Image (cartoon, rainbow, N blue to C red):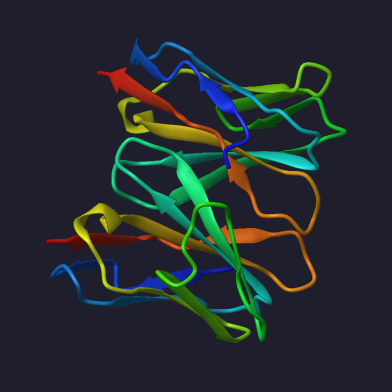
Amino acid sequence: GAVVSQHPSRVICKSGTSVKIECRSLDFQATTMFWYRQFPKKSLMLMATSNEGSKATYEQGVEKDKFLINHASLTLSTLTVTSAHPEDSSFYICSARRTGTNEQFFGPGTRLTVL
Amino acid sequence: SQQGEEDPQALSIQEGENATMNCSYKTSINNLQWYRQNSGRGLVHLILIRSNEREKHSGRLRVTLDTSKKSSSLLITASRAADTASYFCATDDSGNTPLVFGKGTRLSVIA
């Protein structure tokens, strides 16, 4: 099966600090990965599309300087929440599309709490 | 952006009853998928139905798709307490686009 991992699974940080979240495809290559955010009792909202070797594409209303995405290899994308504030507290979920297919696999999510 | 709406937003039933959740979407689609999410956890893929399919079964799950009405339904038969979760539909309009999620239905199955 295709497994996507996220690290860390949960993180608590102080306001103003930056937090990096990793998304890895463990047994397949993923040219494209996606980052979603989910607030409590709400649905998943697409934040950005991450493409290996190129700049990410951000959805309307998502600040690219606030949420830095790096997709440096075919198995790793990172999301850095810069200068985090309490309103950034959320559940962040990544997904990875297996290269050459339409199959998309989801990571287990990262719970970010900003104090 | 979100593609569609799930209906109802919340559903509470007794164990053994059937649960039906509906999903409507706005644009043409390539595939429609249903996911389950337990509170605070990741997504579990349940079933995928292609735009040229009308019905699909998997165990206690039955999914229908009506592209003329831009809607889908998920039926869980003989529900169990362990089915308690949020259920989301997600669509893509081509092989290269990300999945767009509906708002979800929170299902509570009471033992």
Residue A37 % position (x, y): 42, 53
Task: Looking at this view, name the residue that lies furthest to the right.
Answer: B52
**Placement of A32 over or under B19, stated as above or below:** below
| Quadrant housing the C terminus of chain B | top left
| Up-down relation of residue B46 to residue A78 (above or below) | above
Whether residue B94 is visible to the viewer of this picture, yes or no, is yes
Side (left or right) of B89 relative to A88: right
Q: Is residue A1 visible?
A: no
Q: What residue is at 75 percent from the left and 59 percent from the top?
A: A102
Which residue is at a point 65% across and 81% down the rendered structure image? Answer: A52
Relative placement, left or right, of A69 versus A97 is: left
Quadrant placement of the N terminus of chain B = top right
The residue shown at (38%, 37%) is A42
- In which quadrant of the rendered view does residue A8 lie? bottom left
Q: Nearer the viewer, residue B48 or A112?
A: A112
A77 shown above or below B8: below
Q: Position of residue A70 (x, y in %)?
A: 52, 81
Q: Residue at x 73, y 55 (%)?
A: B97
Image coords of residue B99 (percent x, y) = 64, 49
Q: Which of these two is toward me, A6 or B48?
A: A6
Q: Nearer the viewer, residue B88 or B76?
A: B88
Image x and y of residue B2, in percent: 57, 38
